[in-house]
Amino acid sequence: MESTDSKHEIVIVGGGICGLATALALHRKGLKSIVLERSKILRSEGGGIGVLPNGWRALDQLGIGSHLRTVALPLQRGRDIFLGEDKEQKIEYVSGDVRCMARNDLIRSLADALPAGTIRFGCEVSSVDYDSVTKFTRLLLSNGSYIEAEILIGCDGGRSIVAELLGLKPAKEFGVVATRGLTTYPNAHSLPIEFHRHFKGDVRVGILPISHDLVHWFVTFPTRQLTGEKFPRDENAIKQMVIENIEKLQDLPAKVKEVIHLSEPESLSFSHLKYRPPGELLLGRLRKGTVTVAGDAMHVMGPFLGQGGCSSLEDAVVLARCLGSAAAVKNNVDGIEKEERSARIEEALEKYVKERRMRVAQLSMHTYLIGASMAATSKLAKMAFGGAMALFFRNGAAQNEYDCGQL
């Protein structure tokens, strides 16, 4: 039998936004963890990330909100502009403290606030086995070494190996693709400090200024409109693809096209948007013993409401609060039998799941309806999805009011 290289109380798989935020939240509660990140450096791809009021509440609890507000300007308003129809409407959820920041700024701020040695780079998890008797999880790394975890938290995205252990099915595709990027203006841009989206059929082009010299943009369109290479990986090929698509939008303002033409190729990302079915979030297993998931590993959703990253930050705060309230999880607690300690950990994780399940299921349902409407080809289907949104999600800004509470 292979020998175990090391044992840890709390192991987090995935060093993205959710994984780092969870480690930081646990650190604030006095709980030590390690983060296993498969890449050799911090991952900051994706250009920018929108942070809504509920996300800022979570960042303030993590202790980095004040710093991050200095690198991102507050957006004054949000507008949806319908090309060729000469009309626009207010984006309801862009109200309060809404900003877009460079993903790299958020990732680095989270990482810098962690104790040295928390993040273990180059640690790709090949398999995960949970022992229902010992209540420990054994992780096999790609280098052949093993790690045992008393508590395992999967923050490893939509193709999560930890979610697979829980029996969750792989994330599904909307039938919508997205390209994102950053554009730097050395002498400042002249764009209004607002979020505006331009619509033409099922194509959306969004512009979000981060600062006076940095702009985040995105373009989404149905997969059926892809031509040529279905999944371009080369940065220049991605840029050429998106330029070809926006040039077809004759009514798109020249200033918006300029942002995309001037973008840095190394900032570009291209992805098929995915989701976890809301029904699986409501009824699926989100915990097994002392194993659970957070962020995209739990609730990967479309970016249409700007809540993917915000809800991941909420997960981190709630999970750390629940674990921190379980006295048995604290380091160096004496006089507690192993069985009782495991029971308290499971109770804490179950409390976390119960608190998050309905919240993320509602967000996922809303984003699912938007994505399904974009991907639909019939007018009848689009009307049905639109009617469901009007019926169940009349207040577009309601999700911003959510408060994940204190650590």
Image (tube, rainbow, N blue to C red):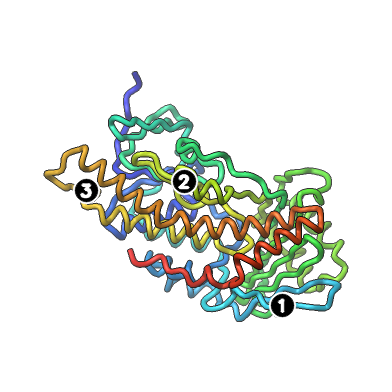
Residue 149 can be seen, yes or no: yes
Residue 107 can be seen, yes or no: no
In the picture of the structure, the residue carrying the numbered disc 1 is 89
Asked if marks 3 and 1 touch (Cβ < 8 Å), the reply is no
x then y, percent, for residue 56? 46, 70
| Residue drawn at x 46%, y 54% as measured from the top left | 357
Up/down of 345 relative to 131, above or below: below
Q: CA distance from mark 3 to mark 1?
A: 52 Å
In the picture of the structure, the residue carrying the numbered disc 3 is 328
The residue type indicated by label 3 comes to Ala
Q: Residues within 10 Å of mark 2 (few under 14, many from 20)?
A: many
| Residue drawn at x 46%, y 31% as measured from the top left | 127
Extreme residue in the left direction: 335
| Residue drawn at x 52%, y 59% as measured from the top left | 309
Label 3 vs 1, first from the N-terminus: 1
Closer to us: 123 or 149: 149
Give the quadrant of residue 193: bottom right
In the picture of the structure, the residue carrying the numbered disc 2 is 14
The residue type indicated by label 1 comes to Gln
53 relative to 366 in the view: left or right: left
Up/down of 143 relative to 249, above or below: above
Q: Nearer the viewer, mark 2 or mark 3?
A: 3
Q: Residues within 10 Å of mark 3 (few under 14, many from 20)?
A: many
Q: Residues within 10 Å of mark 1 (few under 14, many from 20)?
A: few
x then y, percent, for residue 197? 71, 70
On residue 399, which mark appears? Answer: none
Please identify the quadrant where the N terminus is shown.
top left
Up/down of 321 relative to 340, above or below: below
The residue type indicated by label 2 comes to Gly
